[in-house]
Image (spheres, rainbow, N blue to C red):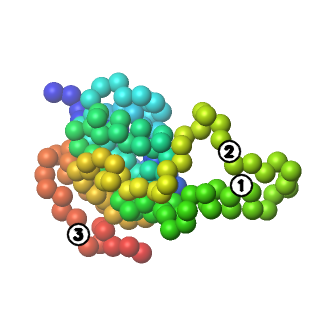
Amino acid sequence: MGKPVIATASLAGCFGCHMSLLDIDERILKLVELVEFNKSPIDDIKEFTKPVDIGLIEGGCCNSENVHVLRDFRKNCKVLVSVGECAIMGGLPALRNGIPLKECLEEAYLNSPTIAPEDRLIPNDEDLPIILDKVYPCHEIVKIDAFLPGCPPSADLIWEALTALIEGRPLHLTYDLVKFD
């Protein structure tokens, strides 16, 4: 039997949860012994090449590309984990949820300060992902199996959750692992 396979992705967010994963420091060497990374910025594999045991997804869904990536993760991952506040609740990108999309786009592209006011234009190229009416947490798009809170979750929380999932044991998340400060 081979190593468990892990995939990771970032949707609408700051990539801080991946930075927290890298903050496991020297334990990353142990993690590499325990698992095989597949689609992930960590190994720069862009497409799934095999079924994945554990998928870690950070960020919320603010556009059609985010939804596509998330659905692809759900389809290819046996266990899918929402990592961080953006994945769980939309996070900072969801601050726009109370403002109509048209108003957000006008403020960002037509009314904001610029050095080239003659070039003001709301992007509308057909190759750009379609911006959604709001930022959606991942569990509103696909089934999520576990949630790791935090902004970002601590490296120790990610380590505990990953090793528990890899070893097939229940998560034992103590207060010091999930506190917010």
**Label 1: which secondary element:** helix
Disc nearest the viewer among 3 and 2: 2
The reply, left or right, for residue 66 in relation to residue 117 is left
Q: Which mark is residue 123?
A: 2
Mark before the other along the chain sequence, 1 or 2: 1
Residue at (30, 26) in percent of width and height: 50
- Mark 1–mark 2 Cα distance, whole angstroms, equals 8 Å
- In this view of the protein, which residue sits in the foreground, 82 or 34? 82
Residue at (35, 35) in percent of width and height: 72
Residue that numbered label 1 is attached to: 109
At label 2, the amino acid type is Pro
Mark before the other along the chain sequence, 3 or 2: 2
Mark before the other along the chain sequence, 1 or 3: 1
**Residue 66 seen from this side:** yes
Residue at (47, 42) in percent of width and height: 64
The reply, left or right, for residue 100 in relation to residue 148 is right
- In this view of the protein, which residue sits in the foreground, 42 or 144? 144
**Label 2: which secondary element:** loop
**Label 3: which secondary element:** loop
Q: Which mark is residue 174?
A: 3
At label 3, the amino acid type is Thr
